[in-house]
Amino acid sequence: IAERGGYVDIEVSDDGGGLNAATTPSHERGFGILGMKERAQNLGGVLTVSNAADMRGVVVRAQLPIRPAPIDASMPVSNKATYEHRAAVA
């Protein structure tokens, strides 16, 4: 975790099997990564998920503004609640 230019950078990694959509059964795929990306975007940030350089694990990186982006009226209700909670805590 690091603070840079009004943003907080977060990186989480593991040493598991990595990501491979070709070998993951469709019933095991969900919306978790997509949901995390949408939440980061709704806060004015960016989230990336990739395989580690050695293909042994996954790296999740988020860059989020220290002050969340203004609320967007088109944002899904569940994300508005997340935003409102973060804004109240900030």
Image (cartoon, rainbow, N blue to C red):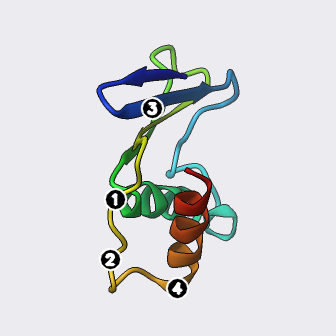
Query: Hey, what amino acid is under mark 1?
Result: Ala
Query: Hey, what amino acid is under mark 2?
Result: Asp
- Image coordinates of residue 68 in percent, x first then y, are 41, 55
| In front of the other: 22 or 12 | 12
Residue 8, numbered label: 3
Label 4: which residue?
A: 77
Asked if the residue under mark 2 is in contact with the one under mark 4, i.e. CB atoms within 8 Å, the reply is no
Q: Residue at x 51, y 66 (%)?
A: 83
Separation (CA) of disc 4 from disc 3:
25 Å
- Image coordinates of residue 22 in percent, x first then y, are 50, 51
* Callout 1 secondary element: loop
Separation (CA) of disc 4 from disc 1:
16 Å
- Residue reaching furthest to the top: 54
* Callout 3 secondary element: strand
Asked if the residue under mark 3 is in contact with the one under mark 4, i.e. CB atoms within 8 Å, the reply is no
Separation (CA) of disc 3 from disc 2:
21 Å
Separation (CA) of disc 4 from disc 2:
10 Å
- Image coordinates of residue 63 in percent, x first then y, are 40, 37
In the displayed structure image, the side of residue 52 where residue 4 appears, left or right: left
* Callout 4 secondary element: helix
Label 1: which residue?
A: 69
Label 2: which residue?
A: 72
Asked if the residue under mark 2 is in contact with the one under mark 3, i.e. CB atoms within 8 Å, the reply is no
Query: Hey, what amino acid is under mark 3?
Result: Val
Separation (CA) of disc 1 from disc 3:
14 Å
